[in-house]
Image: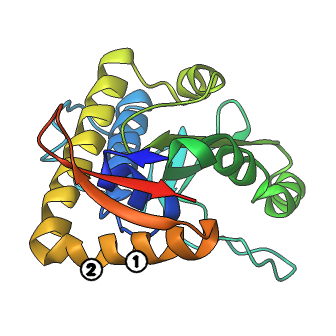
């Protein structure tokens, strides 16, 4: 086994932390929904201020607020709550950023996370309730179902591309930050973990292709 990319290996094992604010996606979705329902008329993400609750005669949008129900429910704080008063429909949007290996799993978990509160809301508001997971990887990849979710929310392809570029930018900035903090600490954790789990010998050799170190594990 040879690993030429230390960062990918550390990400895979969860030994490096990616500081990507999910707020990037929440702000983008909030702006999209506000424009969609006529609460805002702006395309500038930088100047958009997210409020906990915004509403007019047609819609009510809540961001990261607890939803009161008649019974106690653990998961009662979706990232975005949209009540379309005209269509008598509630949409719960849950945002997530993960790695490729966990992408499908995280998307499925978020699509089922609010099943209980969705049932309660359908009784309280007497309307249809749907749950939409908006999940991408740290490098902007999505599942085959993501396009359907994007259309349901009303995100345009250009907006989606912009969101993905922001996430990727923050990911790269996070790599740089981790290196400044001392990536060697995390690299050592990786080495020890691999040696223990694989019961092999670790040999560090220079790479002839890209002038980077390679980790070669021999039985």
Q: Position of residue 98 (x, y in %)?
A: 50, 51
* Residue nearest the observer in this picture, 23 or 92: 23
Q: Is residue 26 left or right of residue 187?
A: right
| 94 displayed left or right of 3 | right
Q: Determine the secondary structure under disc 1.
A: helix
Q: Residues within 10 Å of mark 2 (few under 14, many from 20)?
A: few
Q: Which quadrant is the C terminus positioned in?
A: bottom right
Do we see residue 68 in this rendering? Answer: yes
Q: Alpha-carbon neighbours of circle 1 within 10 Å: few (<14), some, or many (≥20)?
A: some
Looking at the rendered structure, the number of numbered marks drawn on it comes to: 2
Q: Which mark is residue 185?
A: 2
The alpha-carbon separation of the residues under discs 1 and 2 comes to 7 Å
Q: Quadrant of residue 131?
A: top right
Q: Quadrant of residue 144?
A: top right
Q: Pointers 1 and 2 in contact (CB under 8 A)?
A: yes
Depth check: give the residue in front, 166 or 216: 216
User: x, y percentage for residue 179?
Assistant: 15, 66
Seen in the picture, residue 214 relative to 66 is either above or below; the reply is above
Q: Residue at x 39, y 19 (%)?
A: 156
Q: Is residue 9 above or below residue 89?
A: below
Residue at (61% x, 65% y) in the render:
198
| Element class at badge 2 | helix
In the image, residue 6 lies at what x, y percent? 31, 55
Residue 67 vertical placement versus 61 (above, below): below
Which percent across, then down, holds residue 95?
Answer: 52, 51
Query: What residue is disc 1 on?
Result: 189
Residue at 39% x, 34% y: name it: 140
């Amino acid at each position: 086994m040879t690993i030429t990319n230390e960062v990918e290996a550390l990400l895979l094992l969860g030994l490096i932390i990616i500081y990507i604010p999910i707020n990037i996606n929440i702000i983008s979705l909030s702006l999209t929904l506000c424009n969609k329902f006529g609460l805002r008329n702006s395309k500038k993400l930088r100047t958009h201020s997210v409020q906990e609750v915004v509403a007019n005669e047609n819609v009510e949008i809540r961001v990261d607020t607890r939803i009161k129900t008649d019974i106690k429910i653990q998961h009662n704080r979706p990232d975005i709550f949209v009540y379309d008063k005209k269509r008598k429909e509630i949409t719960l949007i849950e945002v997530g950023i993960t790695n490729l290996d966990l992408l499908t799993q995280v998307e499925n978990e978020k699509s089922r996370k609010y099943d209980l509160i969705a049932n309660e809301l359908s009784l309280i508001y007497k309307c249809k309730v749907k749950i939409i997971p908006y999940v991408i990887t740290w490098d902007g990849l999505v599942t085959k179902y993501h396009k359907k979710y994007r259309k349901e929310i009303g995100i345009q392809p250009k907006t989606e591309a912009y969101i993905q570029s922001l996430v990727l930018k923050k990911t790269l900035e996070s790599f740089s930050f981790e290196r400044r903090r001392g990536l060697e600490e995390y690299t050592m954790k990786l080495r020890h973990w691999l040696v223990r789990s694989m019961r092999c010998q670790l040999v560090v050799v220079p790479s002839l292709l890209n002038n980077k170190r390679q980790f070669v594990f021999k039985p």
